Amino acid sequence: MTYDAQRAGEVTFAGHNGDECTAYQAMPDAPGRVPGVVVIHHAPGWDEWCTEVARKFAHHGYAAIAPNLYSRDGPGAPDDVAARVRAAGGAPDDQVVGDVAGAMAWLRGRPNATGRVGVIGFCSGGRQTFLVACLADGVDAAVDCWGGNVVVDDRSLLTPRRPVAPVDYVERLACPLLGLFGNDDTNPSPGHVDRLEEALKRHGRTYTFHRYDGAGHAFMSWYRRHYRVEPAIDAWNRVLDFFARHLKGA
Amino acid sequence: MCTYITEKASIHGSAKGPDGWISVDSAHVYFDHPYHAQLDHALGIDFINEREAAPRRVAVELSAGSARRLVACILAALESGEAAHAIEPEAEPEPDAAR
């Protein structure tokens, strides 16, 4: 079932340490309860892409919220704020987990919430999705879209803001995980994805990976040369099927 | 972007963006997925005034080959310009002393 009518716009929510953060939300404008999805934006920022993704989920019967993980980093266009965050070394992992936990609580607090909540992220957001799925309570399903640096080869790249390779938390993954990766990607490379898969198997985690030939990083981003039509269509179908099974009980 | 590896240089000068000229004291240089350029990876340069509370930037995104050609052009322009003006390599104020 899809929903043509939506309610959408900016909201605020309590993030990490109770900080007031901004977010974009979209949900069906229809009677009945719906599950929730947190959309974690990519490193280039809280931009039009994540609002499109939130509206897509609303169209398919979810309340979606895309938190601005750069809420604390000052005013400006998304790419300018993202550049500021990049120069500072990225959003701290503990802060991201706290912000996404706050966004999940916001979803569960809606009067039309079923209480089931999934998380999806793209690029750095994919890495953060994996992190949240391991460290935050209450994630019912997680989708990692080409998250790089989940497996970290060079430990000197770990920083005070990102002190632990997310794969090191794998035994704490407590929900089903869907991973979508392009085999031409270099971060994560096929080797990185292999090692992530080995870790998931070793710890008996529930996961499904789909890996696309002829696709690299950001293959679902229609506005970039990375876009690959057929893998993107297939990937979206798998995301919607995955969330339907785990969040709607379909 | 998939890394946060950024090279930073203290600089002294000005840059012009859509809002006009700004003084700049830092250049952030990185090689990663670009925001606007239709490239898989690009050499990004952000010219910034770090002293601003919310620093504005003048940004460029270049292919790796373009960036290398630009480096060569910069060095060539400095060499020929300083020769043409019969001056020693510019004794510019140190970035910190200029503040």
Image (cartoon, coloured by chain):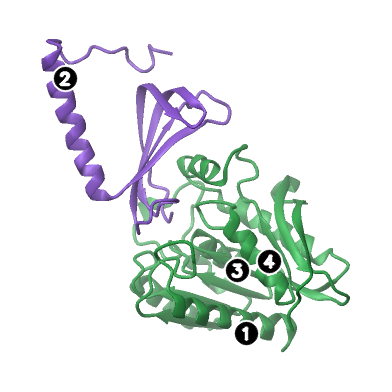
Residues marked 2 and 4 touching at CB (< 8 Å): no
Residues marked 3 and 2 touching at CB (< 8 Å): no
Q: CA distance from mark 3 to mark 1?
A: 13 Å
Judging from the image, mark 4 belongs to the subunit labelled A
Q: Amino acid at mark 4?
A: Arg
Name the colour assigned to chain A in the rendering: green
- Label 1, secondary structure: give it: helix
Image quadrant where residue A53 sits: bottom right
Q: Which residue is mark 3?
A: A120
Judging from the image, mark 3 belongs to the subunit labelled A
Q: Amino acid at mark 2?
A: Gly
Earlier residue among tags 3 and 1: 3
Earlier residue among tags 4 and 3: 4
Which quarter of the rendering shows the C terminus of chain A? bottom right
Earlier residue among tags 4 and 1: 4
Residue A205: x percent and y percent?
A: 55, 81
Q: Which residue is mark 2?
A: B81
Image quadrant where residue A64 sits: bottom right
| Point 49% across, 70% down: residue | A220
Q: CA distance from mark 1 to mark 2?
A: 63 Å
- Relative placement, left or right, of A69 versus A116 is left
Q: CA distance from mark 2 to mark 4?
A: 55 Å
